[in-house]
Image (spheres, rainbow, N blue to C red):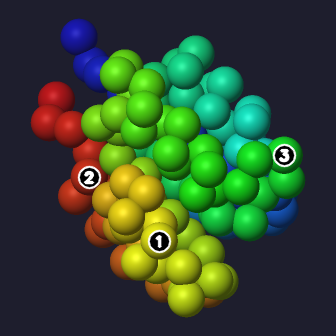
Amino acid sequence: MNLVYRILICDDEASMRELARVVLGNGYEFVEAADGIECLQNARRLRPSVMVVDLMLPGMGGLEMLGELRMDPVLADVPVVVVSAWDHLEADALAAGAARFLEKPFEPDELRATVAELLPAK
């Protein structure tokens, strides 16, 4: 059976979600969310392999969403890559449970390599 990795991309800007999909390329199943509440709901419903999340989100910010995610025993180990222009929040994001922090605008190769590194073994 060929397993497909599911990547949840959460950003309030549709263009950033599309950019992440294009950069990451084929071979993944993508799920999107435009705010922190939708992101958390999709994560609980679909249990993604990796999440790519912005911090500045409507409804529930990325840091709060990370805290909720880490308290959920089913989702606590899902790797999260925070991608944000708010680089002064890197330490906060990592303390909240992010696996990695990439500053916007990110380098495409860096996002690809980071996600690939965090994917669970098949």
- Is label 2 in a helix, a strand or a loop? helix
Give the total of numbered labels. Answer: 3
Q: Residue at x 46, y 79 (%)?
A: 90
For the residue marked with disc 3, what is the amino acid? Gly
Circles 2, 1 touching at the beta carbon (< 8 Å) = no
Tell me the residue that label 2 is attached to. Answer: 118
Real-space Cα separation, disc 2 to disc 1, in angstroms: 20 Å
The answer to whether residue 33 is left or right of residue 116 is right
Q: Which quadrant is home to the C terminus?
A: top left
Q: Nearer the viewer, mark 2 or mark 1?
A: 1
Residue closer to the observer: 52 or 4: 52
Relative vertical location of residue 114 with respect to residue 63 in this rendering, above or below: below
Q: Residue at x 63, y 83 (%)?
A: 86
Question: Which badge, 1 or 3, comes first in the chain's sequence?
Answer: 3
What is the C-alpha distance between the residues marked 2 and 3? 27 Å
Q: Which residue matches tag 1?
A: 92
Query: Mark 3 falls on what kind of element?
Result: loop
Q: Residue 53: x, y in percent?
A: 58, 56
Q: Mark 2 vs mark 3: which is more N-terminal?
A: 3
Residue at image location 29% in from the left, 36% down from the top: 77
Kindly state the secondary structure of the residue where label 1 is placed: helix
For disc 2, the neighbor class at 10 Å (few under 14, some 14 to 19, many from 20) is: some
User: Would you name the residue on which mark 3 appears?
Assistant: 59
Q: Is residue 24 left or right of residue 30?
A: left
Please tell me how crowded label 1 is: few (under 14), some (14-19), or many (20+) other residues with Cα within 10 Å.
few
The part of the image, by quadrant, that contains residue 61 is bottom right
**Residue type at tag 2:** Leu
Asked if residue 58 shows in the view, the reply is: yes
